[in-house]
Amino acid sequence: MSIQPFLIGGEWIKGNAVPIESINPATGELNGYVGSASAADVDHAVTNALQAQRQPSWCNMLPHERARLLYRVAELIIERGPQLSAQQMRENGKLLSECSFQAAAAAGAFRYFAGICETMVSEVAPSRGQYLSTVVYEPFGVVAAITPWNSPLTLEAQKVAAAVAAGNAVVLKPSEFTPTLALELGRIFIDAGFPPGILNVVTGSGPEAGLALVQHPDVRMISFTGGTATGRIIAKIAGERLVPTALELGGKSPHIVFADADLDAALDAVVMGIFSSSGQSCIAGSRLFIERSIYDEFLGRVVERTRALRVGPPDAPQSQVASLSSFIHRERVERYVASALKEGGQILVGGKRPDAPELEKGAYYEPTIIAGLPSSATVCQEEIFGPVLCVLPFDGEADLIEQANGTVYGLGCGIWTESFKKAWRVGRAIESGTVWINTYKALSVATPFGGFKDSGIGREKGFYGIRVYQEAKTIYLGLG
Ligand code: NAD
């Protein structure tokens, strides 16, 4: 059995835990085996990262020199984009077109943080005495980056680019469902000329490799993207260890359509907002709120459009919705749909696996719309992370805001109305890290991203995204 090794200190290592079996969810075929890190392997990775981070060749490297290496990573991602996109598609079943877009975004993240390296400044505070008071920003040392399976290309790039731009060394633990994109990033770091050990990749399970990483005494900062339950486990450990965390967690984003909206544009956005990536997106607009006066008419159009979506293989150009990321995950989605039926919900479209025999071997599930449930129903409260849209009517702004804010999550929100005053009022009242008005899922590396409430702690990306990975240090220089 051939096992793909992982990367520690510039060396490729098979690991001491049970190898990961990587399955293509769109076909059920085996992609291959990937090495799995034990706690001892994780310790080895963190030790290497710490040594590499303290090497004068790295810690004395000037920011504009780090920028050159980051730009080179971006170039290599673009050169290898087709291979990276196809690899992500084979691991999580995402449409190839979406994977290609994400490869370009990953390169963009490296360019953006390279640009920040070249333009960032330290600060001089107005003096209150015979001294010069300055603020400089230091790296933490070793950062642990832990990522989920839905978008490894972009999520891994945005963490690693910012943490390394800030001067840290990183130990990256990708999801066991998508282990190899991080390995490719490790290879790109070596080819770009980064010193060995600045990016280490430990593939392996969450409860073994992931846990060992967050518990390791030399890890000084943890950047995590994944489910809220895992985020809570990590936050408890980090709290005990007094280690800062950035947590990007789950969502149950409201997508709101007022009667005065441009309904054609809203229709496109609502359908794309939930069914792109087969709903496996933290910012999927999974709760659709329609103003009562247009509820029947607009819902009818959403159902009709959803029924026409083409479910198919991720590499077929005509496919609009591909498979789910794993067979286990499809079962979870099916349990949620069953719970909706049990609670009295009505399935307006979908609610089952597709009938097409050519899709039988993959983890496909039809785009599904559920109506007739109150906001308190399980499927309206919990993150399904699949192609399932829950639809609810609302009567006026107060009712809407109460329902929209009535979950533990607060990640994204879409608002469709022609009244900018109403959009502003509602946008300010919604408890959410991002609000889209008359657009949805627009994302830029130049703006902060993160969640309110159980959707997370801290913000990634944006100009200050680099500060997440740095500590402020004040230096007083006596002049008296
Ligand atoms: P998950 O929480 O199961 O796993 C995420 C990562 O954590 C994986 O690498 C896993 O191996 C690791 N892990 C699991 N248990 C661990 C432990 N005890 N200690 C340390 N690491 C551990 O999430 P998932 O199923 O891979 O991803 C889906 C979730 O990610 C959804 O909830 C989604 O909303 C969320 N997500 C959030 C964002 C965001 O930016 N807010 C983006 C994408 C996905």
Image (cartoon, rainbow, N blue to C red):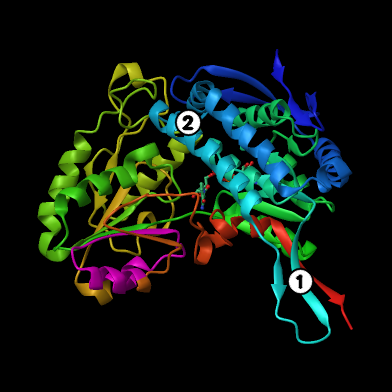
214 drawn magenta: no
Residue 177 point in image, percent of width and height: 58, 33
Q: Quadrant of residue 365?
A: top left
Residue annotated with mark 2: 327
Can the viewer see residue 443? yes
The image shows residue 127, relative to residue 295, as above or below, that is below
Residue type (three-letter) at the residue carrying disc 1 = Thr
Q: Secondary structure at mark 2?
A: helix
Query: Residue 379, which numbered label?
Result: none
Magenta range is 400-427
Q: Tag 1: Cα neighbours inside 10 Å, few (<14), some, or many (≥20)?
A: some
Hey, which residue is sitting farthest front in the picture?
480
Q: Position of residue 105 (x, y in %)?
A: 49, 39
Q: Quadrant of residue 413?
A: bottom left
- Tell me which amino acid carries mark 2: Phe
Compare residues 226 and 380 and report the one nearer the observer.
226
Upstream in sequence: badge 2 or badge 1: 1
Task: Identify the image quadrant of the N terminus.
Answer: top right
Residue 426 is inside the magenta segment:
yes
Classed neighbour count for the residue bearing mark 2: other residues with Cα under 10 Å, few (<14), some (14–19), many (≥20):
some
Residue beneath label 1, please?
A: 134
Instruction: State the image coordinates of residue 353 (x, y, percent, origin top left).
Output: 33, 30
Horizontal side of residue 195 vs 123, given as left or right: right
